[in-house]
């Protein structure tokens, strides 16, 4: 039996109303969605670490999510795994007319043009339609901004969003406690906008910052004998500066 058929058969057995796994039978699209997102992040983590062994395992976990969703859809008569595979194959063929059609080689913008045409064919779709709510907030902010930019709603250069950051900082400082969450959100949105104009992926930049903080904090704990709890703030600051200095050593 081909591996893909084997995993599909396993999922059918897991979801069987009489003999299946109680946990798997209880799941729905909504309850499984967080696991799907988590598995996608674990794939990204394996890529970031360059661990191909882990990547194989994590891609399998992500594939299981596709099989799980497809099986639930099949049970309610909506679609099955073959329909999912057919739909993405059709989409990739449609979006690469210079490879699978009679068109000459097209610029990279052709991909976005075809995607825009596909969105336009969907009822009630505007420039911002289809940007998934489940995306990380920084990534979704960037995608919304890019969509708006395609129809001309954008700063001409990086100076605009940079000035906007100063404006948003002032609004955060002046905000009442009940208003601070919204104002901080506006500030973060402006930072993403500035990063986009500088050609920087804000989500990737924040991941790097997280990794750097984690690495330095761990170094602090190691230097302190396992924990910095109970140390004076001045001593913690010295440990932090030492961790930074050690990173810069050749």
Image: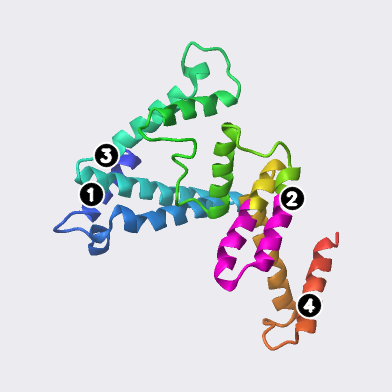
Q: Are marks 1 and 4 in contact (CB under 8 Å)?
A: no
Residue at the location (59% across, 45% down)?
142
User: Is disc 4 placed on a helix, strand or loop?
Assistant: helix
The magenta region covers 163-189
- According to the image, label 2 marks what residue? 163
Between the C-alphas of marks 3 and 2, the distance is 50 Å
Residue 168 part of the magenta-drawn span: yes
Between the C-alphas of marks 3 and 1, the distance is 12 Å
Marked residue nearer the N-terminal end (1 or 4): 1
Count of numbered circles on the image: 4
Marked residue nearer the N-terminal end (4 or 2): 2
Image location (x, y in percent) of residue 139: 56, 49
Q: Which mark is residue 237?
A: 4
Between the C-alphas of marks 2 and 1, the distance is 56 Å
Residue 130 part of the magenta-drawn span: no
Between the C-alphas of marks 1 and 4, the distance is 56 Å
Q: Are marks 2 and 1 in contact (CB under 8 Å)?
A: no
Q: Nearer the viewer, residue 121 or 173?
A: 173
Q: Nearer the viewer, mark 3 or mark 2?
A: 2
């Amino acid at each position: 039996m081909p591996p893909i058929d084997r995993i599909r058969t396993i999922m059918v057995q897991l979801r069987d109303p009489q003999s299946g796994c109680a946990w798997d039978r209880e799941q729905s699209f909504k309850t499984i969605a967080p696991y799907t997102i988590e598995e996608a992040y674990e794939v990204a983590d394996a890529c970031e670490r360059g661990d191909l062994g882990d990547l194989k395992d994590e891609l399998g976990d992500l594939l299981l999510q596709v099989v799980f969703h497809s099986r639930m859809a099949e049970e309610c008569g909506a679609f099955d795994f073959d329909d999912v595979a057919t739909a993405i194959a059709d989409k990739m063929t449609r979006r690469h007319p210079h490879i699978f059609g009679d068109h000459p080689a097209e610029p990279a913008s052709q991909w976005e043009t075809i995607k825009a045409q596909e969105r336009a064919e969907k009822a009630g779709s505007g420039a911002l339609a289809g940007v998934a709510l489940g995306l990380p907030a920084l990534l979704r902010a960037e995608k919304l901004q890019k969509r708006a930019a395609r129809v001309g709603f954008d700063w001409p250069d990086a100076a605009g969003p940079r000035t906007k950051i100063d404006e948003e900082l002032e609004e955060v400082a002046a905000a009442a406690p009940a208003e601070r969450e919204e104002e901080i959100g506006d500030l973060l949105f402006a930072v993403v906008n500035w990063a986009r104009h500088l050609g920087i992926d804000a989500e990737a930049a924040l991941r790097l910052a997280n990794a750097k903080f984690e690495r330095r904090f761990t170094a602090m704990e190691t230097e302190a004998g396992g924990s910095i709890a109970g140390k004076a703030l001045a001593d913690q600051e010295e440990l932090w500066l030492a961790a930074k200095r050690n990173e810069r050593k050749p």
